[in-house]
Amino acid sequence: MTEYESFIKNKIIEFVNTDPRNVLPAHNNMRIYDEPLIGIADADDDYFKEFQKPGIVGKNFMLPNDWLNGAQSVISYFLPFTKEIRDSNRMPGMPSQEWMSARIDGEKFNNAVRAFIVEELKKINVDAVAPCLDPRFKIEEIVSNWSERHVAFTAGLGTFGLHRAVITSKGTTGRFGSVVTTLRITPTHRNYTQYYQYCPYLTQGKCGACISKCPINAISENGKNNKMCSEYIDREILSIYAPRYGCAKCNMSVPCESRIPIDTK
């Protein structure tokens, strides 16, 4: 691990582990996230241009150098939800209050992590930007111009599952974030070559547990209907619990909830 890579990773881990905002005050200060996973991608990685293709992310996906002139690296991280948060959401039906709070208040903390990384990089006289905090970030028809999940894939953190969540060494339940920087950091080695390599259903024809977990049958052997999922959350959950919302039942009590469900050796 290089000096800068070690510096950045240690700073992020320390912040997540010690910052007092990583709790839910309304739920007895339940801790939101466990220690994060961190990966690095080369800003010129060929995958970034591939994401602009139709059916992957799309033409509006902005490259790292579009966000920051002279970009060299992209820092990606995964904040895994604690077991307490996950356990609260196991029952069928509506998402738990704890889960919805973790989804919304947890994303506020995720934004604090993004801002912290940018600040720390600028302290060592390099430029940085968190795309999801940038005024240019936008979502049109449920597709954004920067995908934290696809960035995580590029940075070696994991591959997609049938449910379209990213399967990391700590599972799928959590939140991703990233920062683009002019600092050159050694990229993380990817232990995979395919988008769905960690999904046992799509690689071995086994599992498919997420199909039966979806409360509205938005997941089939052909994948996930994102539009159907989004409309359900807006109609059945956000309309009642706004500004909080969430679901993720397809990620609960399935083999990839907190680990990679296949042998990666």
Image (spheres, rainbow, N blue to C red):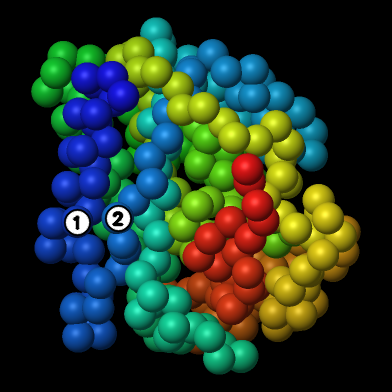
Quadrant where the N terminus sits is top left
Q: Does residue 145 appear in this view? A: no
Q: Is residue 30 above or below residue 5?
A: below
- From the top left corner, tell me how far across and down residue 196 is, in percent: 73, 46
The residue identified by callout 1 is 17
- From the top left corner, tell me how far across and down residue 103 is, in percent: 42, 68
- From the top left corner, tell me how far across and down residue 178 is, in percent: 40, 37
Is 262 left, or right, of 136 in this rendering?
right
Residue drawn at (47%, 57%) of the image: 170
Quadrant where the C terminus sits is top right
Front one among 135 and 263: 263
**Mark found first going from the N terminus, 2 or 1:** 1
Give the quadrant of residue 239: bottom right
Is 178 left, or right, of 140 in this rendering?
left
Front one among 165 and 256: 256
Give the quadrant of residue 180: top left
Q: From this viewpoint, which residue is outermost toward the front?
A: 265
Give the quadrant of residue 68: top left
Residue drawn at (23%, 46%) of the image: 13
- From the top left corner, tell me how far across and down residue 63 is, in percent: 55, 22
Is 162 left, or right, of 127 in this rendering?
right
Callout 2 touching callout 1 (CB < 8 Å): yes
Q: Is residue 208 above or below residue 263?
A: below
SS class of the residue under badge 1?
Answer: helix
Check disc 2 and give the amino acid type: Glu
Residue drawn at (25%, 85%) of the image: 27
The residue identified by callout 2 is 35
